[in-house]
Image (tube, grey):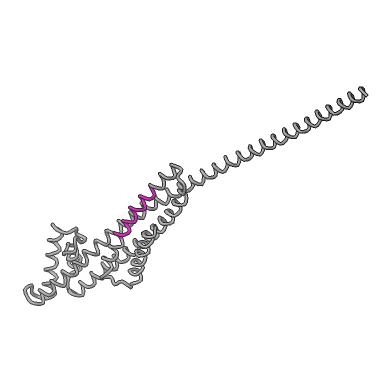
Amino acid sequence: MDKIDQVIDWVNTEAQAVSSGATPLVGAPPKLAAAKTKLAAVRVRLARIGGENRAATAAGAAGAALRTNVHGGAVRRFVDAAAGLEAASAAASTAAAADVAAALRGLAPTAAAADVDAALGGGGGGGGGRGGGGGRADADADAAVERLVAATTGGVTSARAVELRGQIEDLRHRNGEVASLAASVAEVHAMFVEVGLLVEQQGDLVRSIEHNVEATGGETGRALEELKVARAYQKKKRKWYIIGGAVLVAIVVVIVIIVLVMNS
């Protein structure tokens, strides 16, 4: 579990750095994506260990209760880390999207708001933006970029136009990362829900172990009571044997004395 704890601590640190602003918005998407990947690996490992614990408990293996409790603690820490990562990812996605849109409006202050939004809708080299990348969305985004360039520079072939296209392309790339980050929020939430179910299963397993321990303890208690009764019965029976033997010896002694007296 040490490795799992280390990964969870790292994820918490990265999520906190993004939430606090220690990690700039530009660097947030790759950091949060790495955290999500590591957390997904932990989820798989926790699920596997949970299955092993259930099998060990069913088989009555020694130490199953301890392993289950340790695993339960790791699962709860995972759930907390996933919740923190989800919150950090959602906040970063919203802030980054607003930052990109503001930067694009700064480059093309006279452009129509619809063209600004449309320009950010294509893939733009970011691996899929809000328009999903490719096809009609990219075509519409490219057309919007050209309108932005024309509205800002007054001509689409000047050096300023070429520079502006490059700057807009960079922003579209960043927006693609933001869109990916927004999608990862849903994936992290799914992990949160899935492992939340593990917590419930873990609780059922612990309760089952406790019930078995209590039942075993009850049976042991009853067995001890029966043993005490049996021992008491044996002591009582031995006492009567001793008394009976003493009486028998006394009778024999009396008879011997009588016989001796009569013979004398």
Residue at the extreme front of the image, as rendered: 264
| Left or right, residue 33 beside residue 166 | right
For residue 25, which quarter of the picture? bottom left
Q: Position of residue 79 (x, y in %)?
A: 39, 57
Whether residue 256 is situated above or below residue 118 in the rendered picture = above
Left or right of 118? Residue 74 is right
- The x, y position of residue 228, in whole percent, is 66, 39
Name the main secondary structure of what is drawn in magenta. Answer: helix
Q: Nearer the viewer, residue 68 or 24?
A: 68
Judge by depth and name the residue closer to the eye, 75 or 146: 75
- When the figure is inspected, residue 84 is found, relative to residue 151, above or below; the finding is above
Measuring from the top left, give residue 221's x and y in whole percent.
60, 42
- How many labels, in total? 0
Q: Is the C terminus in the top left, top right, bottom left or bottom right quadrant?
A: top right
Residue drawn at (8%, 72%) of the image: 156
Q: Is residue 163 left or right of residue 259?
A: left
Residue furthest to the top in view is 263
Query: Looking at this rendering, what residue extends furthest in the bottom direction?
Result: 159
Q: Is residue 229 above or below residue 70?
A: above
- Depth order, front residue of 203/184: 203
Is 162 in front, or is 112? 162
Quadrant (top left, top right, bottom left, bottom right) of the N terminus: bottom left
164 w.r.t. 239: above or below: below
Picture quadrant of residue 132: bottom left
Residue 43 lies in the magenta stretch: yes
| Image quadrant in which you'd find residue 172 | bottom left
Please tell me whether residue 259 belongs to the stretch shown in magenta: no
Taking the spot 20% from the left edge, 68% from the top edge, the residue there is: 113
Magenta segment range?
36-50
Give the residue displayed 19% in from the left and 69% down from the top.
Answer: 171
